[in-house]
Image (tube, coloured by chain):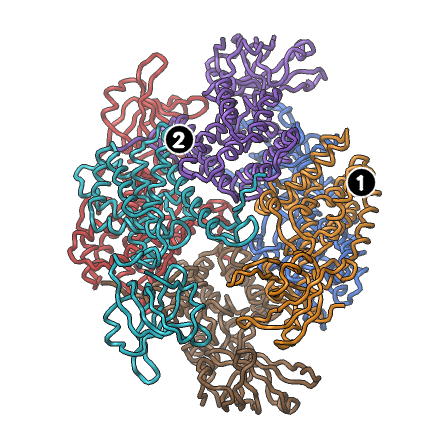
Chain colours: A blue, B brown, C red, D orange, E purple, F cyan
Amino acid sequence: MKTNFVSDITNIKDGDQVEDIFLVKVKQQLLRKDGKPYLMLKVCDRTGTIDGKVWDGVEELTGRFAADDIVMIKGIMSSYKGTKELNIKTIERMADDAVDLSDFVAVSEYDFDSLEKRLYSVITGLKNPFLKKLLTLFYEDKEFMELFKIAPAAKEIHHAYLGGLLEHSLEIVELCRDMKNHYAEIDLDLLTAGALLHDVGKVRELKYRRSLDYTDEGRLIGHIMIGVEMVDEKIRLIGDFPAGLAMLLRHLIVSHQGTNEWGSPKEPQTLEAIILHNLDDLSAKVNVFRKAVRTDSGEGDFTSFNKPLGRYLYKGRNTE
Amino acid sequence: MKTNFVSDITNIKDGDQVEDIFLVKVKQQLLRKDGKPYLMLKVCDRTGTIDGKVWDGVEELTGRFAADDIVMIKGIMSSYKGTKELNIKTIERMADDAVDLSDFVAVSEYDFDSLEKRLYSVITGLKNPFLKKLLTLFYEDKEFMELFKIAPAAKEIHHAYLGGLLEHSLEIVELCRDMKNHYAEIDLDLLTAGALLHDVGKVRELKYRRSLDYTDEGRLIGHIMIGVEMVDEKIRLIGDFPAGLAMLLRHLIVSHQGTNEWGSPKEPQTLEAIILHNLDDLSAKVNVFRKAVRTDSGEGDFTSFNKPLGRYLYKGRNTE
Amino acid sequence: MKTNFVSDITNIKDGDQVEDIFLVKVKQQLLRKDGKPYLMLKVCDRTGTIDGKVWDGVEELTGRFAADDIVMIKGIMSSYKGTKELNIKTIERMADDAVDLSDFVAVSEYDFDSLEKRLYSVITGLKNPFLKKLLTLFYEDKEFMELFKIAPAAKEIHHAYLGGLLEHSLEIVELCRDMKNHYAEIDLDLLTAGALLHDVGKVRELKYRRSLDYTDEGRLIGHIMIGVEMVDEKIRLIGDFPAGLAMLLRHLIVSHQGTNEWGSPKEPQTLEAIILHNLDDLSAKVNVFRKAVRTDSGEGDFTSFNKPLGRYLYKGRNTE
Amino acid sequence: MKTNFVSDITNIKDGDQVEDIFLVKVKQQLLRKDGKPYLMLKVCDRTGTIDGKVWDGVEELTGRFAADDIVMIKGIMSSYKGTKELNIKTIERMADDAVDLSDFVAVSEYDFDSLEKRLYSVITGLKNPFLKKLLTLFYEDKEFMELFKIAPAAKEIHHAYLGGLLEHSLEIVELCRDMKNHYAEIDLDLLTAGALLHDVGKVRELKYRRSLDYTDEGRLIGHIMIGVEMVDEKIRLIGDFPAGLAMLLRHLIVSHQGTNEWGSPKEPQTLEAIILHNLDDLSAKVNVFRKAVRTDSGEGDFTSFNKPLGRYLYKGRNTE
Amino acid sequence: MKTNFVSDITNIKDGDQVEDIFLVKVKQQLLRKDGKPYLMLKVCDRTGTIDGKVWDGVEELTGRFAADDIVMIKGIMSSYKGTKELNIKTIERMADDAVDLSDFVAVSEYDFDSLEKRLYSVITGLKNPFLKKLLTLFYEDKEFMELFKIAPAAKEIHHAYLGGLLEHSLEIVELCRDMKNHYAEIDLDLLTAGALLHDVGKVRELKYRRSLDYTDEGRLIGHIMIGVEMVDEKIRLIGDFPAGLAMLLRHLIVSHQGTNEWGSPKEPQTLEAIILHNLDDLSAKVNVFRKAVRTDSGEGDFTSFNKPLGRYLYKGRNTE
Amino acid sequence: MKTNFVSDITNIKDGDQVEDIFLVKVKQQLLRKDGKPYLMLKVCDRTGTIDGKVWDGVEELTGRFAADDIVMIKGIMSSYKGTKELNIKTIERMADDAVDLSDFVAVSEYDFDSLEKRLYSVITGLKNPFLKKLLTLFYEDKEFMELFKIAPAAKEIHHAYLGGLLEHSLEIVELCRDMKNHYAEIDLDLLTAGALLHDVGKVRELKYRRSLDYTDEGRLIGHIMIGVEMVDEKIRLIGDFPAGLAMLLRHLIVSHQGTNEWGSPKEPQTLEAIILHNLDDLSAKVNVFRKAVRTDSGEGDFTSFNKPLGRYLYKGRNTE
């Protein structure tokens, strides 16, 4: 459906017609020098962002869309102070099912429904009745699942795309399952529940319907504290959830960042917590590595300096 | 009532009778080489600790007392591998009102009831109806207040004595009140509530009926997380507690240690949080300073090396 | 008097006449390709900086003003490599009383004379005759007071405006006074003198007649060492100033940054030094917070990332 | 065979006969005041160490044993300055197969031969002919294998027992194998070779025939550098070992500690290196955790403070 | 020979002819929209870099030169998106002796041959026969010496110019010689060999025929490890090189960065290693200082902020 | 003169007569149970410390000596709780010239007068008249020189013996002189003056007539600040000492510890300051190394763990 991407837009000359689909990142109503209102927009797709202005019919058009909507825009390409911008004539909200979300935002390579199915399968496989009940309550909470299904694992850094949180959590669940073969004393159900819930607070820490940012409580309280609250809320709905089990599960959430410096008020003190932190870290690093190698377009065998890991990464496969 | 303190006990010769009151710190039932049980105790007062053994009448005596009880002991002074110990003949639990607690454990210099009165006066002075209601719920929770009245502020370091937590919290409340004169934009009720509640999780982080130690959830979850849970629990009892206010109050608890390194998952981001952290730190340091100066018996103008502050402290008053 | 501010200057077209008042930040005489001299200026007001060139009459005009002067400029707006600059025709130094200094540089919201009066009142209220004499010597030193009255507390970060040092020092004095109610053993006169003098070395560490920068000795020696020297110089004028008192006062200056890492060769070892450091830190942080909240123009409840504090700050007042 | 362990030795009275087997930790020939030689020994078993003196027949007895031998001692229990010591009358070296090594030193719970078989199986399973050849050269190097089979993974901290190095290396190999299911782009043969060889330098870094200590080159050069040298030595024996493969394998060894701070001159820059470091760290931490939980005899649900991990560890299984 | 430097190129108008010598930094063959190949170059001299494009005769011209060659270019000055670039018509490789290398890259102020002579003199002055033999082997290795003579000591930071490594190494040798007068127990031959060889791995860590960058093994293994390998390789050629001496020499290389944080897996543990690290550090810092002072063109007595040292540097000579 | 050293004292049986010379480290008058006074002493020589008690004739004997005196003691060897102590009968102060100070305290291996002569020679060799005058004023200040001649360079760590400060300062002066050959732009007179004066504040930071400790102003202000004050005091006596020179000299003192973390409020910003810090550090480390190697009596090629340097040191000379 989408024809031109922002990265190609320099091919379009001033005065040309543009008719295409964009995601509205910013929408502000400002005043012109003569006192009349106009709309200042920033619209984007997955390749970049471009400014747009609505000078005419502001009152009518402004009601047709909101920030984070995906819209069909018709307008004229123009320039302002050497920068391209769209002089927008008409704008219409697109129905969700009429667009391919991945044209506009980064999205997990797994589709949301398959991730949800894997989640369901993990939950039904739990043997501990309390943990199974707890996870089921989360799973049956529609409002929550709608958010959890598409949440990113971070604003930047690793798994920073829609669906990234669930993809990352399930990856850890599966890594944990293998650990049971090596470290038999692990309480695998507890560890699995911890893997699924360790970052659950991110659904409230981040805003991410389409563009990613922190919420107010995300900045002021943080996903660890929010996650514990969310778990506690469900636990209260289960009459007889064992206090000791709740404490160990909370410990998994509280300690999963590994050290105070990384924002965990407590360091891992159980075998499950030590493993969860290590595998969470591994999953994040592998994700960063893969993205760096995939997106780096430079010559040579190394990526450009990778900020999240603080080093250059070797993308070559030279074994000769 | 108490005659001899542990620090004087080397004056007593082996074979002498001892009849005095002690606090039972440790009580373990072990087996003798011949398979019979005996009791291995560690009993103490505020000056030190001494071992005690019950060889005879174990079954009868063991039922009469528990760890953390204060007991009257009759026995014979003896030695084992060069260390004094009590060969205990009889042992009886003392009634709480028959002993002076401060003979056995460190206690705030303010009496518990006067601290409670100051707390009540602070609560009744709050103007914000939600915060007043919240604090009143805590105040009216008898089980909580019994613990809160005598809680220490720490296991070691600062205000590490019964009543220390309330003394410390009220000190901060009063320091905060003065700040309002300098920084008028402060929300004083919010700051006051934060000062009273910032360490409230310590009533569950620490065991302190008499001797001080961490609880399991204290180690695994920590007082910050516990404190937020306790506050949330009360907030749920108030139907319409504003979400924004709850968030800012939680932020005060979450950020009061000041930095990640010190165990706060978030740094202070509001004016009230900046002030609360600074005054919490000041109150703690002054308490450490006062204790060091008061208890140091060395010559010269400096204390011995003070571990909590990591330096020598000047106890002289030389202004000449 | 001033009509256009630099922030508005893009409204003026190339070729338009400009006649307005500016502060001369940089003044350099350079050579044109043909070997003739021209003046390269940077002129500013509180909203920004713009380049200026004097091509004609250089010899005559250059004698009429110096860097840090405030001048009336007449010229023509022009552009060079896409950047606006002033082609200056005439330039005249303005008398100090003909300009409003706050149009050009950041200035304390308190006027200098009222700050001086508060200082005088603090000094006359001291009871310790030696400290009173010492502070009075500073106060009566006209050359010093002229500098001290308008000094900023820093080049950047906190209280970085004319008058900021005295405003900051008096704020700490008043915070200290309240502390006496809580910590009665404080030597309040000593603490007050420390609060007034802790940053006194900044009058020589910084250049700040109008624009702010470090002096050579500021960079090489630093305000702590300079401050101690300045205090010692006055103490020598007082015959019998007690050696112990001088030592404790010097300790307040030397340790006020709190740790080696922050540039204090010694950590606070007296109660007064512990308090001075905490309140100095608090005053600085509150000042940073207030400035960030006042000047941030972004949407949402958070400021942009605040470098001095290393975090985002919450500027919302959401208690609902 | 061994009757009394050092931990029981206080049960033996001065003057009693002792006849038992010990490991000789230290053997020094010193001079008595009258100028005659005597032997000062420290002998031990897995429970502790005791001093021994040979006063008579020194010349004859000294030739019969050396430090690190296991010996049968006959002597008389005595005391010197309050400490028990053995007055040794006869001493005879024991044949290796006449003693149970695990009575004297910490030993892996896996027997050495089964570890060697698992190693052989891993090597024969490699598909990359160069890596298979390389590992086979190590395996066929008898002198090396004799050392590698019994090497500990560390002097202290984790896997600090005979056989610990091979146990630890094989554990990582198996953890790595599972990773291939999750991260398919891994070069599993390379990762496996890295897992087997990452700590191979420890066979020269440590002295460990029986008691553990660092060698001179262990202290001065370290196991990372030594390991690379050992691998290079074998690679030179293979004519056409690919240079790129050798570089990537060396990188695995060089970077396996993860950061400069932990002694790796380079951080992991390949996917295999990132994974190897994480799993090495995990294997070490789990080993520390298990040992702490197994050996801690205190009451309560926590171990005593665990130095290697810098925290208390939860040994409880309270899920109720 | 060279007429215009890149820094002057803005003086040349679009459409003007350019005929001059440049160093080819980057050479890439890309495709035009119409599918035909063109060459995208970056050419430079010591003053800067400019883009160049070859649109015609690509197939013929591309064979005449390679990256890192110095070439004579004829072309037309043009602009693309506001940036100057050369439209190249002909391009010819220059013979090495027809150019002055220092027009294109930074070069030591000492000429390469004089540095080599000083090196030879140091080697012949060694008394220890093994170290003399070892260094002679390096000196007689032509391939090595060709690289060693022109190697820089770093990609950036200190001695980052051709010949810098040898200049730096000889400077340390001479500083070491003086140390012998103060610390007589030094093994001067060992220390001298260490000084010459401590950074020898940089000939493989860096690519520097003309432009400087890291090699793959430089990034993955690092110059310390490479240096040890290079030394070991020569030592193997000397039949009876003493093992202890080799160990101490390797220790000098391994520890010369001083701490783990700076990339040395071991800290200096011998007197020679302590001295080598200190003088290496001193030589580097003096080199940074000199360069900063020489190249800084700002006014005032201080350089701009110096990143390698993390501070402003005083370039004044004010002793009045 | 001295017969027995404390290290040999266990050879003396209880009840034996002792008559020997000791240094009085601690002297306290306490009360016996019967209320009569007695003297509790700690007396020492360079090998150790022993307790002493004066039970009789206290009033008479106490007037004959003070702490830090060297005294002739006659008494009876006895024991108290298993520890040897002297029952002292008579005690007499020794004249300074009747004792060999090095029997009692650690002393530089250079004699004080030869150090003083080297100092004089350095001063007279200065060419800068102001620096020469400044140093001469120090040299001619008898009270100062008496302290400076015997001052240690530290309480512990390096050069911690009488005369150590001057020995250390002169060592740096001589190391600096060599630097001039390599770095010709050095202002050698300035650097020499800095080397002599960098630690001059230690004469007031430390108490060291015989035993070493910090003074009050040593702890509260520190030797850097004190040193600057001492230099300023002399500079004031020289009418026209150039301000710039004074600033650079003060910078050498202020920055000589190298970083804030090590207590320098400023980092080295001049070439001389960079060199002074490096050589100060080198001299200290060599001194630590030498002492560790000289005093370590363990077997093997390594010293025990060296705290000041934080590592084991290689004391072997194995180059075979």
What is the distance, in whole Å, between disc 2 and disc 1 at their CAs? 77 Å
Q: Nearer the viewer, mark 2 or mark 1?
A: 1
The image quadrant where one finds the C terminus of chain E is top left
* Residue at the spot of label 2: C9
| Number of numbered markers | 2
Q: Secondary structure at mark 2?
A: helix
Is the C-beta separation of discs 2 and 1 under 8 Å? Answer: no
Q: Chain of mark 1?
A: D
| Residue type at the position of mark 2 | Ile
| Visible residue check, residue E120 | yes
Q: Position of residue B197 (x, y in %)?
A: 50, 68
Q: Nearest the camera: B263 or F278?
A: F278
Is the residue A122 above or below the residue F196 in the image?
Answer: below
Label 1: state its secondary structure.
helix
- Residue at image mark 1: D136
x and y percent of residue C50 in the render? 38, 29
Please state if E131 lies on the left or on the right of C276 as rendered: right
Q: Position of residue A254 (x, y in %)?
A: 62, 60
Q: Quadrant of residue F251?
A: top left
Residue B230: x and y in percent read 57, 69
Label 2: how many Cα within 10 Å (few below 14, some 14–19, many 20+): some
* Residue D256 horizontal side relative to residue F262, left or right: right
**Res F54 → quadrant:** bottom left
Report whether C302 appears left or right of A61.
Answer: left
Crowd band around label 1 with a 10 angstrom C-alpha radius: few (<14), some (14–19), many (20+): some
Question: Do the residues at discs 2 and 1 belong to one chain?
Answer: no
Which label sits on residue D4?
Answer: none
Give the residue type that dot 1 points to: Thr
Judging from the image, mark 2 belongs to the subunit labelled C
The quarter of the displayed image where residue D77 is located: bottom right
**Do we see residue C182 in this rendering?**
no
Residue nearest the observer in this picture, F252 or F285: F285
